[in-house]
Amino acid sequence: KLLGAGSCTSGSSTSSSSRILNGKEEDPRRKAETASLVARRLTRTNLQYEASSSAQERLVANDRSSRQIHSDERKEKKRRRKQRVAALLAKYQADFLASSDDGASSSQP
């Protein structure tokens, strides 16, 4: 035998929050306490979710900026290497041209 979705097997075992939802709460003071308890739980859960969400966003942003910094460092290193090679090449070319013009042997680096 299947029970319906809204049916309840025993009326005494319902929790206070479900009694509020079903409208079976008699004592208004207890009703207010239970409502505030439910609100506090929801607020705490929401705050935990927001905290973990913002922490996750910070981690992603930090990772992205870290990768960007490393990428920039690699590009700068590559640019300096090219500049150094170009300077050495220019120096060797100048030395070679000077030595070929003079007919003397080129200076050793």
Image: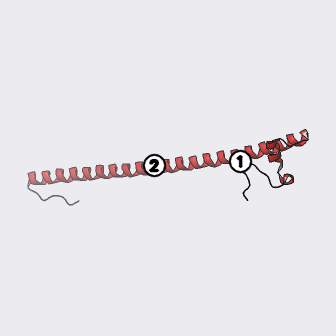
| Structural crowding at the residue carrying mark 2, measured as other residues with C-alpha within 10 Å and reported as few (<14), some (14–19) or many (≥20) | few
Question: Toward the viewer: 23 or 80?
Answer: 23
Q: Quadrant of the N terminus?
A: bottom right
Q: Nearer the viewer, mark 1 or mark 2?
A: 1
Residue type indicated by callout 2: Ile
Question: Residues at badges 1 and 2 in contact (C-beta under 8 Å)?
Answer: no
Q: CA distance from mark 1 to mark 2?
A: 36 Å
Residue 60 percent location from the top left of the image: 53, 49
Three-letter amino acid code at the position of disc 1? Thr
Residue 104 in the image: state x and y as whole percent: 11, 57
Residue 54: name its quadrant.
Answer: top right
Q: Residue at x 84, y 48 (%)?
A: 16
The residue where tag 1 is placed is: 45
Left or right: residue 21 versus residue 27 is left
The residue labelled by disc 2 is 69
| Lateral position of residue 58 relative to residue 75, left or right | right
Q: Residue at x 13, y 51 (%)?
A: 97
The quadrant in which the C terminus is found is bottom left
Q: Residue 94 location in percent, x, y?
A: 17, 50
Closer-to-camera residue (96/80)? 80
Element type at marker 2? helix
* Residue lying at 82% horizontally and 51% vertically, measured from the top left: 15
